[in-house]
Image: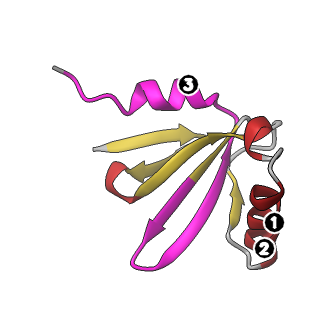
Amino acid sequence: MYLHIGNEKILSYGDIIGIFDIENASVSKYTKEFLSRSQQEGQVIPVTSEMPKSIVVWEKKGERRLYLSQLAPATLRKRTRLPG
C-alpha cells in the first residue's frame, strides 16, 4: 500500500517510520537537533512550497528522508488506515 503525502509524492507504507505534527515536533530540544542535523545532511525534502504541517520520516535500506508535507498529520494518518 502507498500513502500520498501531497504534490504527487507517494511513499510505501512499509518504509514510513512516523508521521509527526511539525509544530509539536519542533518544541523538543532533541527533535530540533535531529531536524537541524537532517537538514545539514540533505535529508529534508519539502513536498510543498506552502507552510508545512507535518513531517513524514521515511527510511529504506538505511537511507532516511524527512518529507515536509502541507497536509495535516491527522489527514495523513487517516489515509494509512487499511479498508475493511
x then y, percent, for residue 48: 73, 44
Q: Report helix, strand or loop for mark 3.
A: helix
On screen, residue 20 versus residue 44, left or right, reads left
Q: Please, what is the three-letter code of the amino acid marked with disc 1?
A: Glu
Residue occupied by mark 2: 37
Which picture quadrant has residue 51? top right
| Residue appearing at x 50%, y 77% in the figure | 63
* 17 w.r.t. 37: above or below: above
Measured in 3D between alpha carbons, the distance from the residue under mark 3 to the one under mark 1, in whole angstroms, is: 24 Å
| Residue appearing at x 74%, y 79% in the figure | 41
Measured in 3D between alpha carbons, the distance from the residue under mark 2 to the one under mark 3, in whole angstroms, is: 26 Å
x then y, percent, for residue 42: 73, 75
Residue occupied by mark 3: 74
Residues rendered magenta in the picture: 57-83
Q: Nearer the viewer's eye, disc 3 or disc 1?
A: 1
* 8 w.r.t. 74: above or below: below
Query: Between disc 3 and disc 1, whose residue precedes?
Result: 1
Q: Report helix, strand or loop for mark 1.
A: helix
Q: Nearer the viewer's eye, disc 2 or disc 1?
A: 1
Q: Please, what is the three-letter code of the amino acid marked with disc 2?
A: Arg
